Image: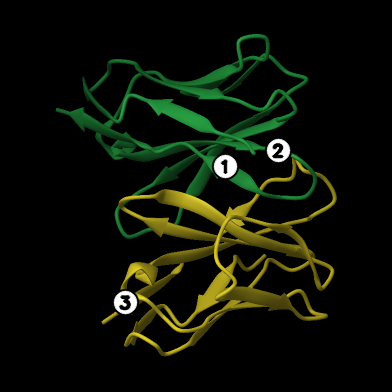
């Protein structure tokens, strides 16, 4: 089975712009979770999508949003970018049937905000 | 929400020695505890996980123990090798759905 893929792998944006990141889960997985990884804050949960619905949300401002399509692919969007949004954005896919399902991570998108 | 604390933040061992990393969690409803290994520039990779109905799990040189009463779990790596050098994260799953709260990570260095 192909693993979790994310595009693009690298992005450079300027403050005030918006960005869209994409995540394709493992075939058959219906849950996609997004995480932000920074040296200062570590790995933080953004939100989870399951069957095209947001099932869980972390403590991030409304500038961070996402969606999931019928094929389980997910996108996240960050509007009005700030310098502090520079981070590695990771998505993880899982079957989604149980809170104990294993989550498999993608390679991440490295976002740099100038 | 859940809070996960992880210690130590850095750990240096000699090749062949054992390494132990400890985590505590706050939400007694947490029921799933995975451990991820992340090498520099790579994605987190699951190395072992444990569910709340089990007290210990072992996979070759890696083992995890869970104490639900004390709300802590630990990763044990025996016979460490240089390729074990990486950052290790513990995590806990809480509430419904698939969301993980991570510890702050342990930089493990295995020296020759």
Residue B19, position as x, y percentages in the image: 34, 19
Marks counted in the figure total: 3
Checking the image for residue B101, the label placed there is 1
Residue A71's place in the image compared with B87, above or below, is below
Q: Do the residues at pointers 2 and 3 share their chain?
A: no
Residue A109, how many percent across, how many down? 43, 73
> Mark 3 Cα within 10 Å, few/some/many (few <14, many 20+)?
some
Residue designated by label 2: B94
Give the chain coloured yellow: A
How far apart are the alpha carbons under marks 1 and 3? 24 Å
| Residue for point 72% across, 50% down | B98
**Label 1: element kind:** strand
Q: In which quarter of the image is residue A13?
A: bottom left
Tell me if label 1 and label 2 are in contact, CB under 8 Å: yes
The chain identifier of the residue carrying mark 2 reads: B
Q: Do the residues labelled 2 and 3 touch (CB within 8 Å)?
A: no
For residue A112, the mark is 3
Quick one: A93 or B72, which is closer to the camera? B72
Would you identify the image quadrant in which residue A68 lies?
Answer: bottom right
Would you call the spot at circle 2 few (<14 residues within 10 Å), some (14-19), or many (20 or more)?
many
Contact? badges 1 and 3 (CB < 8 Å): no
């Amino acid at each position: 089975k192909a693993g979790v893929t994310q595009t693009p792998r690298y992005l450079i944006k300027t403050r005030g712009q918006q960005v869209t990141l994409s995540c394709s889960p493992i075939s058959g997985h219906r849950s996609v979770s997004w995480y932000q990884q920074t040296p200062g804050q570590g790995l933080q949960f953004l939100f989870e999508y399951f069957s095209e619905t947001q099932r869980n949300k972390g403590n991030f401002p409304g500038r961070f949003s996402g969606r999931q399509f019928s094929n389980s692919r997910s996108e996240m969007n960050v509007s009005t970018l700030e310098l502090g949004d520079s981070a590695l954005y990771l998505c993880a896919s899982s079957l989604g049937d149980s809170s104990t399902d294993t989550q498999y991570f993608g390679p991440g998108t490295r976002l740099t905000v100038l | 929400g859940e809070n996960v604390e992880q210690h130590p933040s850095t750990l240096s061992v000699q090749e062949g020695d054992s390494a132990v990393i400890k985590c505590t969690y706050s939400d007694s409803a947490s029921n799933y505890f995975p451990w991820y290994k992340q090498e520099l520039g790579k994605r987190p990779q699951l190395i072992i996980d444990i569910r709340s109905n089990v007290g210990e799990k072992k996979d070759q040189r890696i083992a995890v123990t869970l104490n639900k009463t004390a709300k802590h779990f630990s990763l044990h790596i025996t016979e460490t090798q240089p390729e074990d050098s990486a950052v290790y994260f513990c995590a806990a799953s809480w509430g419904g759905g698939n969301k993980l709260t991570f510890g702050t990570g342990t930089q493990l260095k295995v020296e020759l």
